[in-house]
Image (cartoon, rainbow, N blue to C red):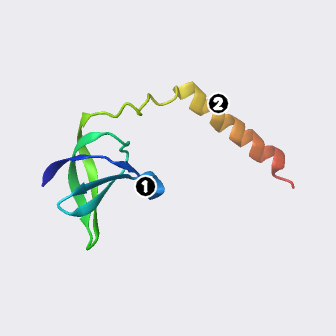
Amino acid sequence: MNFVVNIEKMGHRGLGIARWGGKVVLVPFAAPEDRAEVSITRAHRDYDEAEIVKLIKPSSLRREPPALFLVLAVGVSCNTSRYLFKGR
């Protein structure tokens, strides 16, 4: 069953927090102020976990992910750091 929620804020582990039907709904990969169509993936007594089916209105807080070359450069620098500290 799908329904539309407004993500109110970020919670523990970076999950978006919304409310629907008197319960808290935790939504991964959501940002505060997102309006999204979600689907329940796991139901609990006090809260539900859901996934985004469709992002209806993205938050102004969203931004494009960093370029791939930056990610690769950071990965290379991490590997180099591990090598330098390996013997210590």
- Residue 8 locus on image (x, y percent): 33, 48
**Of 43 and 33, which appears nearest the observer?**
33
CB-based contact (under 8 Å), mark 1 and mark 2: no
Camera-near label (1 vs 2) is: 1
**Point 22% across, 47% down: residue:** 5
Q: What residue type is labelled 1?
A: Gly
Q: In which quarter of the image is residue 72?
A: top right
**Point 44% across, 28% down: residue:** 64
Graded by Cα atoms within 10 Å as few (under 14), some (14 to 19) or many (20 or more), the crowding at tag 1 reads some
Q: How far apart are marks 1 and 2 (CA)?
A: 30 Å
**Point 57% across, 33% down: residue:** 71
Q: Name the residue under label 2.
A: 73
Say what secondary structure mark 2 lies in: helix
Q: Mark 1 points at which residue?
A: 11
Q: Which amino acid does label 2 sit on?
A: Ala
- Residue 1 locus on image (x, y percent): 12, 55
